[in-house]
Amino acid sequence: MVFTSNLARGARRLKISTGIGLSIVTAIVLYATVAGIAGLSQSEGFFILDSDGTSAGRTGLIAAALTGAPLAIALWRLMRMLREIERGGVFTATTVRELRGFALFVMISALASLFVQPIIDLIAALISGADKVRLSMTFDLNDFFILLVSVLLFFVARLFSEAQRIADENEQIV
């Protein structure tokens, strides 16, 4: 397979950007985890907000940590895939595996953003012994597009796998 230096440079730039994003997401997840478990309060308008725009409470912080952790893993898998591409392995089994892992954890993060907060609210209501429980769950256009992109990434991974199979066949013929 002919490997171009432009592809390597592009993969390197994207890997660096992804690393910066991973650092930011990891810092937010760590903050949300520590603050949520410790029950620390946030000042109004801090960077983790509930759906109504107010500062997230303890359950909101825990939900942010549980939603952000799969996103951090997804970015880590993306960095590994880009490292493989940077080294010249465009249609390799490693690239396909890391792309599938990235797609999987993006999907898990998207599904967690839908279901984690209502589940935490339900558990908190059951623990507190509330007579009535009000749960809300939203599914907006952003959620739809994130799920759509993750499904498309699985399809692209399948295309990569097929390209790898064809390349292997061509090497055996020659």
Image (spheres, helix red, strand yellow):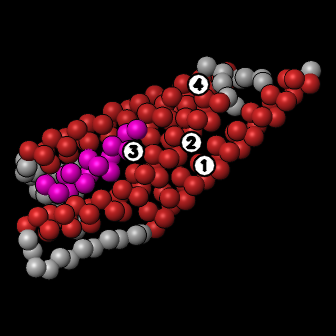
- Secondary element under disc 2, as helix, strand or loop, is helix
Residue at image x 20%, y 57%? 60
Q: Can residue 9 be seen by looking at this rendering?
A: no
Q: Which residue position holds label 1?
A: 154
- Tell me the distance, in whole angstroms, between the alpha carbons under discs 2 and 3: 14 Å
**SS assignment for the magenta stretch, majority:** helix
Residue 151, quarter of the rendered image: bottom right
Q: Is the residue marked by circle 2 packed among few (<14), some (14-19), or many (20+) residues within 10 Å?
A: many
Q: Which amino acid type corresponds to the residue marked 1 in the rendered image?
A: Phe
Residue at image x 26%, y 47%? 65
- Judging depth in this view, the residue of 90 and 14 nearest the camera is 90
- Tell me the distance, in whole angstroms, between the alpha carbons under discs 3 and 4: 20 Å
Q: Nearer the viewer, mark 2 or mark 3?
A: 2
Q: Is the residue marked by circle 1 packed among few (<14), some (14-19), or many (20+) residues within 10 Å?
A: some
Locate the C terminus by quadrant.
Answer: top right
Q: Which amino acid type corresponds to the residue marked 2 in the rendered image?
A: Arg
Q: Which residue position holds label 3?
A: 71
Residue at image x 69%, y 31%? 91
Q: Nearer the viewer, mark 4 or mark 2?
A: 2
Q: Earlier in the sequence, mark 1 or mark 4?
A: 4
- The residue range painted magenta reads 58-73
Q: Which residue position holds label 2?
A: 100
Q: Which amino acid type corresponds to the residue marked 3 in the rendered image?
A: Leu
- Tell me the distance, in whole angstroms, between the alpha carbons under discs 1 and 2: 6 Å
The answer to whether mark 1 and mark 2 are in CB contact below 8 A is yes
Q: Which residue position holds label 4?
A: 84
Q: Nearer the viewer, mark 1 or mark 4?
A: 1
The answer to whether mark 2 and mark 3 are in CB contact below 8 A is no
